[in-house]
Image: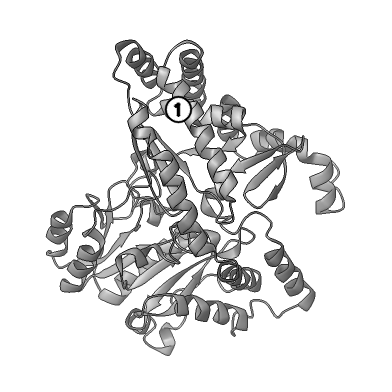
Amino acid sequence: MAAVPGSVADILATRAGEAMELNDRYLNPQLGRIVRTLGFDRVWTGGEGAHLIDSAGTRYLDLVCGYGTFAVGRNHPGVIAALHELLDAHSANLPQIGVSVLAGALAQELVARAPDRIAAMVPANTGTEAVECAMKLARAATGRPRILYASHAFHGLTLGSLSLNGEEQFREGFGPLLPGCDPVAFGDLDALRSELARGDVAAFIIEPVQGKGVNLPPDDYLAGAQQACREHASLFVCDEVQTGLGRTGRFFALEHWNLDPDMICVAKALSGGFVPIGGVLVSAEVRSRVFDGMERGVRHGSTFGTNDMAAAAGLVTLAVIEREGLVARAAAMGELLLELTRPLVERYEIVRDVRGLGLMWAIELGPPERRRRKAVWNLVERAQPGLAAQLIVVPLFHRHRVLCQVAGHRINVVKALPALVVEEAEIRRFAAALEDVVARADRMGGAVGRLGWDMARGSAHALRR
């Protein structure tokens, strides 16, 4: 058995190069295969602001952002200082049969930033846990069994939230899932009203902007959905796990449509990326119906849900967002990013759409018109559907030191979630890099075609194994 170094610093300093070996042996070897196939296998040794840093000291613009977790940037010094301060304070963390001030203070700050209907918070640890909490609260508050969700939704990967997941790739092999969870087409108000009219729906849970493909709702859809829920005494729940805390240019994305939901799920960026955190912001009515007597005071909870580390990080993260004007910054940088990238739709055959809201952005690709180029596209797609998007992601990483992600299954969507602290120069650099790789991929021949075919074979093999 290998000797364990005496400190975390020792492990980071002496074993950083072992990360892939340790992953493949003790964690998820298939993830390792994917990373190596794409050529993303770097030894990451640091992070600062909007960047990841590898062992050679090379800085990569990080547009995955921990799936939106590092909204205030990686290793924000203000959050680090607050966590050091908390550890030095030796707080009475998690009394359990008792309460703590930091969790209550965090709830107070979130409620103050939420719509009028919201009155309290039920703490959680993650986004998926927050969604599952909302499902439980909805059933308890209404006495009804069914939960509705939208097609193409992503709400998490534990069994309850997976039951609200609109992507079969995540659901396959894990059934039977939770009964009473039914999809409605995203953007289709008539379909939603038809299901609500049955009178047995506890809640409709919806992402204001769908994270999986950055799908924006039709103009009147969310307001209409909220009104339909009110008319049928069903709860309207906004999953803001990814869209919240400034990501879309408003503190909550729901503000773009003046929504006033019964519950709001939050997580991801709330702790600055340091501590797992989540919560459900709830109306006074929901809280009183669920926790409706002393004997029901602990009918829902979470061991670490009120922990001081998460609450302290959350409080400081909110202060950073406000002090640094990151909500307004996300709006401005998002407008610039769309301004720079929307023209790609007209310039290149393979670009079907460029869309986004604030610093939540995506480009969607489709087959080119010209026969030879389309043949290369189809060859890549036959080997692994949806893989043509890697013709954008892989060269962005290798040629331009930009890390972003494919955000769809069997569809070609490339997604970017820059840190809200990203500099304007980096937005412009990304837009220029994107045009470079799109122009090369648009030609769909020569080296680009060979790259796509090699990646398709490698990825298909890795994913099958």
Relative to 27, is 116 above or below? below
Relative to 339, is 281 above or below? below
Among the 4 quarters of the image, the one containing residue 275 = bottom right
Relative to 266, is 49 above or below? above
- Residue, x 55% and y 31% (percent of image)? 396
Q: Nearer the viewer, residue 53 or 381?
A: 53
How packed mark 1 is, by other alpha carbons closer than 10 Å (few <14, some 14-19, many 20 or more), is many
Residue 19 picture location, percent across and down: 71, 38
Among the 4 quarters of the image, the one containing residue 99 = bottom right
Residue 424 seen: yes
Give the quarter of the figure containing the N terminus: top right
Looking at the rendered structure, the secondary structure element under dot 1 is helix
- Residue, x 41% and y 17% (percent of image)? 443
Residue 223 picture location, percent across and down: 24, 65
Residue 407 seen: no
Q: Is residue 274 left or right of residue 360?
A: right
- Residue, x 46% and y 80% (percent of image)? 112
Name the image colouring. Answer: one colour
- Residue, x 49% and y 57% (percent of image)? 330
Instruction: Pick out the residue farthest to the bottom.
Output: 294
Please state which amino acid type lies under the numbered disc 1.
Val
Q: Which residue is mark 1?
A: 438
Residue 274 picture location, percent across and down: 64, 60
Q: Nearer the viewer, residue 447 or 163?
A: 447
Residue 229 picture location, percent across and down: 21, 68
